[in-house]
Amino acid sequence: MDTLTASGVLRRLRDRRLLIKQGSGSRTYYTLESMEDRSVTPSAPGAWLLEAADAEDHGTRPTCGDPPNPHKLGPESTQVLVGIPDALWERIQAAGQKPRQAILRGFLLELCALRPFSADELCQILGRSDPRELTRGHLKPMREIGQLALLYPESAKHPHQAYVVPGSYSEAGYD
């Protein structure tokens, strides 16, 4: 497989939390995610490879790494919804794909007050496609003004990094 296809496959495996990206640039390498730590399970062994081959043949982008629309969450993504009250979930759905900043940030505060959520999980819940954009546009500014905090503040790039509302969690319960 060519470099571009291999890169796409690695990215999708990382997005599905099957691999952990280590290093950067020419020193990038990947390690396997442990089975206990995975929040998303693959549909079938090797399915990602078939999807990559299909994409290469037909010029379409495989969907295995794309975060789902909150209105169309599949069974593999529903565990992200555990603990979210029905009323909050209904308000998130009613707000649509692009709610106003104040509404979106209100949802982020409510969600992170329930339990720690990673940027990827928040994207899945809110129907966003880019965790980096959510981090840049909302999560980081909310951290800077003290509305949110990192679950692992000593290591910003911790592989299980998540966002919390300060004071909502005892450190002993999540370390």
Image (cartoon, rainbow, N blue to C red):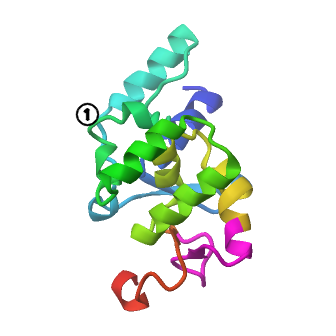
Left or right position of 3 against 94: right
- Viewer-nearest residue: 100 or 167: 100
Locate the N terminus by quadrant: top right
Q: Residue at x 63, y 37 (%)?
A: 98
Q: Residue at x 40, y 88 (%)?
A: 170
Q: Residue at x 60, y 79 (%)?
A: 155
Q: Residue furthest top?
A: 58
Looking at the rendering, which quadrant does residue 119 occupy? bottom right
Query: Magenta stretch: residue 147 in it?
Result: yes
- Viewer-nearest residue: 93 or 10: 93
SS of the residue at dot 1?
A: loop
Provide residue 20's location: percent of width, then percent of height: 49, 58
Provide residue 91's location: percent of width, then percent of height: 45, 45
Could you tell me if residue 67 is visible in this image?
A: no
Q: How many marks?
A: 1
Left or right position of 52 against 104: left
Q: At label 1, which amino acid type do we have? A: Ala
Q: Which residue is mark 1?
A: 44
Give the main secondary structure, helix, strand or loop, of the magenta stretch. Answer: loop
Provide residue 39's location: percent of width, then percent of height: 34, 55
Q: Residue at x 69, y 50 (%)?
A: 101
- Viewer-nearest residue: 116 or 5: 116
| Residue range of the region highlighted in magenta in the rendering | 142-158
